[in-house]
Amino acid sequence: MWFLIISAVIFSAYSFFMPKKLTPIEIFSTIFFAMTIQDNVDIYLDGKYDLYGYFSKGIQWRTLIAIIGIYPAVTTIFLNYYPFQKQWRNKLIYILGWSGFAVLYEYVAVKSGYFYHNGWTYLYSAFSYPVLFCILVIVLKIVQKLVRESI
């Protein structure tokens, strides 16, 4: 539990105080998209199929620490530093680096007891994270396009 709380505080504090390259509407929109995707995926992979979960089987209030304390902050940090103006190789390295970090973080979360696998593997995560990070970039680009068109 301490790993979760410390992580939430560090990620949230950093995302709050870092110099922002994104506008508030870009941050708000992408955070809520990411949380919606995360909730929907968890409904099926955790709730229905019990492939993984937080703490123990079932819904628990302390899970909100991860959902509210980590996911919005990580989404903001990831997108804030995404190398939009760089070559595709830089973008690929950035996404793969974050994916590696996410798998490593998941490993520590499992070892600390705030997350568990029950049929899910790190290999599934290694393939899922790059897709999820790419989706976040696409959603940010859509939000930016919608904002430009509304002006």
Image (tube, rainbow, N blue to C red):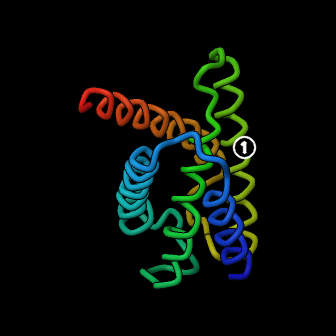
- Outermost residue on the left side: it is 150
Task: Mark 1: give few (<14), some (14-19) or many (20+) Cα within 10 Å.
Answer: some
What residue is rendered at 65% in x and 14% in y? 87
Comparing 3 with 72, the one in front is: 72
- For label 1, the SS is helix
- Outermost residue on the bottom side: it is 61
In the image, what residue type sits under mark 1? Gly
What residue is rendered at 32% in x and 34% in y? 147
The quarter of the displayed image where residue 42 is located: bottom left
The quarter of the picture where the C terminus appears is top left
Task: Give residue 45's position: percent from left, percent from top.
Answer: 43, 59
Comparing 33 with 110, the one in front is: 33
Task: Give residue 145's position: percent from left, percent from top.
Answer: 34, 28
Q: Is residue 146 above or below residue 57?
A: above
* Residue carrying label 1: 100
What residue is rendered at 73% in x and 81% in y? 2
Q: Is residue 47 above or below residue 89?
A: below
